[in-house]
Image (spheres, helix red, strand yellow):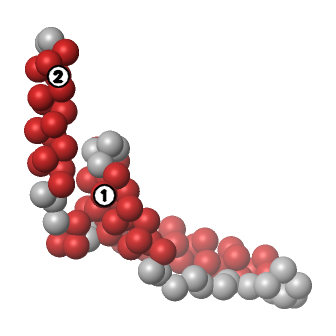
Amino acid sequence: MTRRSSLKLYQMESLLISQVNYDSMSTTELKQYFLKHRGDRGAFQAYLDRINQRPLRIIASPDDPDFDEKVQAAIRRKLEAARNNSSE
């Protein structure tokens, strides 16, 4: 491939990428799209915006006497949710 044709291909890919509707994608779809199209900065920014909108959940404070239990329970819930999502 010549330098000129590779530049033209890059410009065409950039045009196609800019036409993608990130809002119509689920968070998982957006993440997969971004991982597949790492050069698409718009997808990266859309993904960051999306995950930063999630509320932070505080599981336990460091001085909580049940800290270990609460963290382990949260990990179990996360693993169970991941298992359920992968079986669908």
Task: Determine which residue is flagged by label 2.
Answer: 6
In the rendered view, would you say 39 is above or below 85? above
Can residue 77 be seen from the camera position used here?
yes
Q: Is residue 88 left or right of residue 76?
A: left
Label 1 secondary element: helix
Q: Residue at x 14, y 18 (%)?
A: 4
Q: Is residue 8 left or right of residue 23?
A: left
Q: Residues within 10 Å of mark 2 (few under 14, many from 20)?
A: few
Can residue 87 be seen from the camera position used here?
no
Q: Residues within 10 Å of mark 1 (few under 14, many from 20)?
A: some
> Where does the image place residue 53, in percent across and percent down from the top left?
45, 80
59 or 70, which lies in front? 59
87 or 21, which lies in front? 21
In the rendered view, would you say 26 is above or below 33? below
Amino acid carrying label 1: it is Gly
Task: Determine which residue is flagged by label 1.
Answer: 42
Quadrant in the rendering for residue 32: bottom left
Q: Residue at x 12, y 57 (%)?
A: 19
> Where does the image place residue 24, in percent across and percent down from the top left?
17, 72
Q: Is residue 47 left or right of residue 24?
A: right
Amino acid carrying label 2: it is Ser
* Residue 32: mark in rendering: none
Which quadrant is the N terminus positioned in?
Answer: top left
